[in-house]
Amino acid sequence: MSVLRGMTWDHPRGYDCIVAASAEYARKTGVEIRWEKHPLSAFEAAPIEQLAAQHDLMVMDHPHIPQAAEAGAFAQLDGHGHDDALSELDAQAVGGSHESYSYGGHQYGLATDSAAQVAMYRPDLLSDPPRDWDAVFELAADGRVVWPSNGVHALSSLVTLTANAGSPPTSEPGVFLDEEAALGALDLMHRLAELIPPENLAQNPIDVAEMLATSDTYAYSPVGYGYVNYSRPGFRANRLQHIDIPAGKAGVAGSQLGGAGIAVSASANDVDAARAFAIWLASADVQRGVYYDNGGQPGYAPAWDDDRLNDDSLDFFRGTRATLEGASIRPRFAGWPEFQNRASVWTNQALRREITDDELLRRFRDAAEELLTKD
């Protein structure tokens, strides 16, 4: 029996589903995948090429793809007998999710988990959730709104709101955001920060989902990455419903694309076997079957369109589909992960009024000139 080593992230959405799918794959093919789970911070703690050298398969987020491709850490999926399947997956993409795992004309990963910043609320507490920002602020004034706004998620919200104002992140080397649009987004974020619990400024989407699911004090969050687990029966005492982000200038477009995908290490013990598993994991029957049934959040349209999955999750997929289809993709540079690390801290500092918005934008400019470039 072939044995492959995999690395994934330590959440039921990242671990339980892929372990269950791998067990089924082993029964079908005799190929065993042994998975380790790590916090998402592990990708910042070690170079991507070092992590890839230690594993055959990796579940990771797409902003690392340019860095991994330029370092030669990941194997190309195209050109090795799977091009028809890759074309089919491209046609089944939810928004830019599949595209986000390509770089330099090659496919380096598959969007087995698609996500973007969306809104979520408690349907038992709120029959008519806000659909625009005026309604959000009205509810926030009543103390009913929470918002995940720690470092990386404050930056994600800034990208979402700037893109929703009509100015998504640029792919121009040395440039990050349109500054006029960013200042407008920051103004909205400051107003919201004054109306949410102070602890939100140190919290991520899981923290805020837990607040909503376990307390009746709060009822709604306007912008944060959605987790289908919280919409499913039995995950927590109270279920959350997920919907599109509040409408702005661009409707519900512009939300920062997130999610996770599977990639194959260029130094895998059996690269062909690892590629075959990745293609299988992204296939429609697996995504809407064993993968979803064990806590996964599928990445491709056949699962997102599936009636059973939507009925089971308070229409998680249909309810956020417009946001996903209009989502923005982060700048495609090998230096993006380091830029994001720095810019996340600065954005949170700006929300806390520790630095001015003008200083934040100045730091963005300097870091973009240093890191968002091509060799």
Image (cartoon, rainbow, N blue to C red):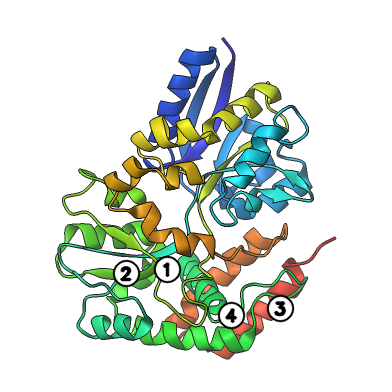
Question: Residue 26: where, in percent of width, then height?
Answer: 49, 16
Please state which amino acid type lies under the numbered disc 2: Ser
Quadrant into which the N terminus falls:
top right
Discs 4, 1 touching: Cβ within 8 Å: no
Question: Residue 335: where, in percent of width, then height?
Answer: 71, 61
Label 3 crowd bin: few (<14), some (14–19), many (20+), radius 10 Å: few
Please state which amino acid type lies under the numbered disc 1: Asn
Q: Which residue is mark 3?
A: 366
| Foreground: disc 4 or disc 1 | 4
Q: Is residue 187 above or below residue 310?
A: below
206 displayed left or right of 250: left
Label of residue 150 in the image: 1
Comes first in the chain, label 2 or label 1: 1
Q: Residue most toward the top?
A: 1
Comes first in the chain, label 1 or label 3: 1
Distance, label 1 to label 3, CA atoms, is 22 Å
Q: Which residue is mark 2?
A: 221
Q: Secondary structure at mark 2?
A: strand
Distance, label 2 to label 1, CA atoms, is 14 Å
